[in-house]
Image (cartoon, rainbow, N blue to C red):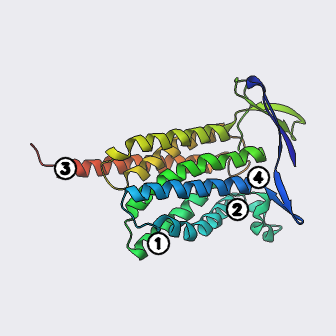
Amino acid sequence: MINTVNFPGLGIYLTLNRVAFTVGIREIYWYGIIIGAGLLTAVLVATSQSKKMGLPKDTIADITLIATPFAIIFARLYFVLWNFKDYIGDMKNIFNIRQGGLAIYGGIIGGVAAAYVYCRIKKVDVKKVFDSGAFGLLIGQAIGRFGNFVNVEAYGSQTALPWRMEIYSDELGALISVHPTFLYESLWNVAGLIMLLMYRGKKKFEGELFLLYVAWYGIGRAWVEQLRVDSLPYGASFKVSQIFAIVTAVAAVFGIIYNRYKIKQKTPLK
């Protein structure tokens, strides 16, 4: 599918093809390539941080091999759960992920849960693993959002801002200018990565960097969801990912405050 995507306020005019290339009769989509690039970069970044934290050499690679299938399954389940009515008449379509329908929050839940179980079984420091993984998650999500850009999805409401993104609306039968929310979230994640890199040497307790990631991403995602027009569940009066983002951000902030309070209580008075 060919899509026209413009940024008229910036003088940028693009024609995007979702298909990168064809192998036999199978089309290979840019979305999958970009997600794969994001995953690979995430593993490399998380591995570099895990070495600084003294974790065993292959820890991140081993966790990635185990957690990735669970992340994909949960990403799909999260999406299907909130749009289940669309699959009642054709249940086998639940397994057809080539048509899209993966939710990042579901992927994070599945991946984090699998990583936690792995750490418990292998007796690896789960807090250090999560701290290392926070860096990978941020860069991986920053890259992955450009998959949404190629698919012309995850965009926001109409706007006249200078950086507006112009796309064709099938519903209105005309070009419309919208918030490029995929870019907002990507830049927010890059800013979060820079913040963690600057703060990593000052962390007060193991696991703090992961909690900072959860809080930072949750705050940004709650804001982005408010702008988006294709939030889950489609057509509902509430946005489940926005609610989840707010709840997890608040919980993460509470966790940071609580752990710092415990440390302060244990610190002897001078």
Which callout, 3 or 1, points at the residue further toward the start of the chain? 1
Helix, strand, or loop for circle 4? helix
Q: Relative to the observer, which residue lies in front, 63 or 216?
A: 63
For the residues labelled 3 and 1, the Cα–Cα distance comes to 32 Å
| Mark found first going from the N terminus, 3 or 4 | 4
Front one among 104 and 247: 104
Check contact, mark 1 vs mark 4: CB within 8 A.
no
Closer to viewer: mark 2 or mark 1: 1
Q: Residue 50: x percent and y percent?
A: 42, 58
Give the residue at mark 1: 118
**Image check: 216 left or right of 174?**
left
| Residue on which disc 3 sits | 265
Q: Quadrant of residue 93?
A: bottom right
Residue 114 appearing in the image:
no
CA distance separating discs 2 and 3: 46 Å
Please, what secondary structure does the residue beneath circle 1 have? helix
Residue at 53% across, 56% down? 44
The answer to whether 186 appears left or right of 258 in the picture is right
Mark earlier in primary sequence (2, 1): 2
- What kind of residue is marked 2? Val
The amino acid type, in three-letter code, at marker 4 is Trp
> Residue 80, which numbered label?
2
The residue wearing badge 4 is 30
For this rendering, which residue is in front, 53 or 122? 53
The alpha-carbon separation of the residues under discs 2 and 1 comes to 26 Å
Q: Residues within 10 Å of mark 3 (few under 14, many from 20)?
A: few
Residue 135 point in image, percent of width and height: 49, 51
Q: Residue at x 82, y 50 (%)?
A: 18
What residue sits 80% from the left and 71% below the top? 92
